[in-house]
Amino acid sequence: MVASLDLRAFRDASEAFLGELDREYYLHFSGQQDDYGIEAVYERHAGLFGRRAVEELRDGGSRELLEFAVEGLLGQETKAEAADLARREAGLEIEVDRERLPYREASVAQANEPDPERRNAIDMARNAALDEHLHPLLLELFERSRALTRELGWPSTLAMCEELSGIDLRALGGEAAAFLEATEDRYEPTVEPRLEEQLGFGFGSLRRADLTAFFRAPALDRWFPEERLVPSLVETLAGLGIDVEAQAGVRLDTEPRPKKSPRAFCAPVRVPDEVYLVIARIGGRDDYAALYHEAGHTEHYAHMEALLPVEDRYLGDNSITEGFAFLFEHLTDDATWLERLLGVDDPGEVVAHSRAVKLVFVRRYCAKLAYELELQGEDAPLDLMPGRYAELLGSAVHVDWPRTTWLADVDAFFYAARYLRAWALETHLRRALEERFGPAWFAEGGAGALLRSLWRPGQAQSADELLAELSGAELDLGVLAT
C-alpha cells in the first residue's frame, strides 16, 4: 500500500459517506422527502473519490475498497445528473383515460389492474414518459460513465467490473446461456398454465404489460391476507430465535406514501445499528415476497459484527446478501411454511405459481446479463442496442419486449450478475438447511444459530468461498436448472 494513503482514515470516511448516502436514499425513495440530496453528500466527502486515491488503491490495496473508490468516483462525477433524474422521476405523472397517476405509483396500479387493455395503456404511458423525460438523462449518465471508465484506464465497463468484482462475468454469461438452453423446452409448459389461471390467457395473447399482474397473482390473495403480512414475519423470525420487535437497529417501513418507490429495498444506514426495511404495499403475494426478501437483507446487516472493517459490512460480494434475501423470500412459496404460518390447506397452487414466476425472472436476468455484456463491452454500437435489448429479453421471456427501457432496465456495475449468483447460492443454502434441520428449518433454533454464524462475518468472503466452507459445493447456475 502506498504510504500516502491513510487506510484507517479512508475506511472511517468511507463509512460516514455510505451512511449519509443511504440515509438520503432511504428518505427520498421511501417518499419522505422530495429532495435527493446526494450532491451535498458527495461534496462533503469529495476527498474520498479523487483519482489519486483510485490509483493508490489500485497499486496495492483492498479490492473491495478499490471497487468502492471507483464507483464513488463515477458517482461523484455524475451526481448532478443522478439527483436530477431522481427528482424528475419523483415529480413525473402520466395520464391514462384522463386519469393522472404518479409515475412511480403507476406500476402498482398496473399490477392491480384487471383489464389487460388498461394495463397496456398504463405501460405505454409509462414508457412514453420515460422516453420523453428520463431517457435523455439516462443516456447522458451512461455515456459520461463510459467515458470516465476509459479515462481511468479500463477499455470498457465490462473489463472494469470484472477486475473490481473478481467475478468472471463472461464465464457467467456462458452459464446463463446454458441455463436458457436447458430450460427452453419446459419454459412454456411450466408458465402457460399459470398464466391462464391468473390472467385468463396464455402466451398467444401475453404482452409485457401483463407480467406485473401475473406476478401480482390476485387469485392467490385469499392465501396472503394483509393483516398477516408483518405478524407472519415476526413469528417466522421468532422461530429462528430472533425477536425482530426487540431489535433496536431494525426499522420496518411499510406505510403507504404517494411518492414511495414501488421497488422494495433495505437501507443499511449504520451497520448493524440502523437498518431500514422499506416496502410499498401492492397487495397479496407480492407484498409477502418483497417483505421477506428485504427481511433477509435486513437480518444479514443487523447481525454483522460491529467491529468488522467497513468493506466487510457494506461492500464485498453482494451475491451473499442477495442470497440470504432470496432464502427468506423463498419461504413465501414453501409448502411447509405456507401450511404452518398462513394456514394454506393445499399449497400446490401457490408453489406452482411461484415456480413459474421464478423461471420467468431467472430467464429474464440471464438475458439481461447477455445484453449488458454487449452493451458494456468495448465500442458497443449504441444505435443497435435498443434492438438487441428487445430481441434478447423477448426471446428469453417469450413476449414482445419494448425497446424503450434499454437503459432504464440496466442495473449499475453488472448487478444482474449478483442476482444470478445469489439465486444459485440460495438453492445451496436452502438445501443445506433442509438436510440439517428438516423441511420446517425456519422453526428451528439451530437453523437460526447457523444463519447468525453466517451473517456475523458480513461479506468478508465471496459467495463462492462461503458456499465452499458451508458444503464444499461450487457456485454455478447449473443448480438452478435441476
Image (cartoon, grey):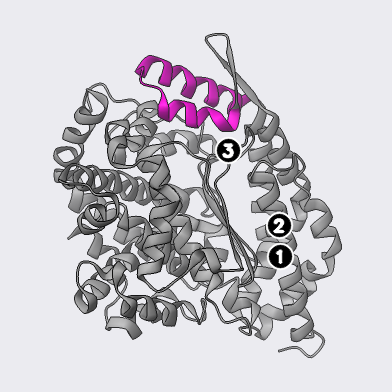
Q: Which residue is mark 1?
A: 19
- Tell me whether the residue at label 1 lies in contact with that at label 2, contact meaning CB atoms closer than 8 angstroms: yes
Q: Residue at x 73, y 76 (%)?
A: 55
Q: Main secondary structure of the magenta part?
A: helix
The front one of 58 and 80 is: 80
Residue 429 placement (x, y as % from top left): 31, 71
- Tell me whether the residue at label 2 lies in contact with that at label 3, contact meaning CB atoms closer than 8 angstroms: no
Kindly identify the amino acid type of the residue bearing the numbered disc 2: Arg
- The kind of secondary structure element at disc 1 is helix
Q: CA distance from mark 2 to mark 3?
A: 19 Å
- Tell me whether the residue at label 3 lies in contact with that at label 1, contact meaning CB atoms closer than 8 angstroms: no
Residue 4 placement (x, y as % from top left): 82, 86
- The kind of secondary structure element at disc 2 is helix
Q: Which residue is mark 3?
A: 256
**Is residue 202 positioned above or below 64 on the image?**
above
Q: Tag on residue 23?
A: 2
Q: Residue at x 22, y 23 (%)?
A: 201
- The kind of secondary structure element at disc 3 is loop
Does any portion of residue 169 appear in the rendered image?
yes
